[in-house]
Image: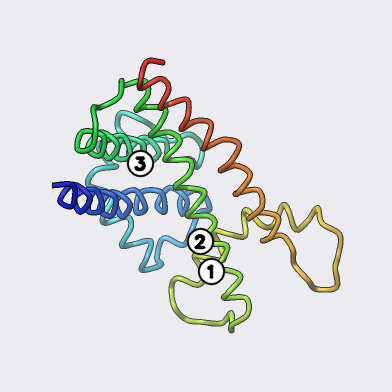
Amino acid sequence: MPYLANAAQILIEFIFSILVGLVVLRVLLQLVRANFHNPICQFLYKVTNPVLMPLRKIIPAWRRLDIAGIVLAWLLLLLKRVLVFAMLTSVPSLAGLAVIALADLIGFTLIVVLMLIIVRVILSFVSNDSYHPVVPLVFQLTESILKPVRKRMPALGGLDLSPMIILLAIFLLQALVVAPLLDLGLRLGSGA
């Protein structure tokens, strides 16, 4: 029976990672004002609109930040945690689950940014004039993060160390924000 539970957990993790990934990417693309006519943006909007548009009537955006998208991603991660905990052990309290889902959302977003920066670094070694629709989106998503760091760093003869600084910051945020939030959520969930 544990084999079946492990397989079910893998399926749940996979399905919810895709769903949350779509929503998080849409929120990030809206935040950086990505080109709406890009086919990838069109796909993300078509896939997420049926759920996000009704939710936006209840939860409005704040400036360029899509709060409804953030809430939807958080709710998906909350549901994922409920399903996983229900299969393996007892379900923690709602307060604990809420904090765990928040930590999952922050951690997931940091991993997405980490992957985008790694892809950007790889693309910088290859030709930048690719006609694939992913290339301009990767550069748009990462430039808003890398540019402020790059402006504060001294000139190093064409060597850009801003991706390494951001990657270090992501690892520190994982250790100093996400891990303590997970611990707090597990403590709240168990009632300790």
Residue 115 is tagged as: 2
In the rendered image, the quadrant that contains the C terminus is top left
Crowd band around label 2 with a 10 angstrom C-alpha radius: few (<14), some (14–19), many (20+): some
Instruction: Looking at the image, tell me whether mark 3 or mark 1 is earlier in sequence order.
Output: 3
Q: Secondary structure at mark 2?
A: helix
For the residue marked with disc 1, what is the amino acid? Answer: Val
Residues at marks 2 and 1, CA–CA distance in whole angstroms: 6 Å
User: Mark 3 to mark 2: distance in Å?
Assistant: 18 Å
Q: Secondary structure at mark 1?
A: helix
Which is nearer the N-term, disc 3 or disc 2? Answer: 3
Q: Nearest the camera: 152 or 109? A: 109
| In front of the other: 131 or 95 | 95
The structure residue drawn at horizontal position 71% and vertical position 60%, both measured from the top left corner, is 162
- Residue 20 shows which numbered tag? none
Q: Amino acid at mark 3?
A: Ala
Tags 2 and 1 in contact by the CB under 8 Å rule?
yes
What residue do we see at 26% from left, 55% from top? 47
Which residue is disc 1 drawn over? 119
Closer mark to the observer between disc 3 and disc 2: 2
Report the residue marked by disc 3.
73
Above or below for 22 versus 60: below
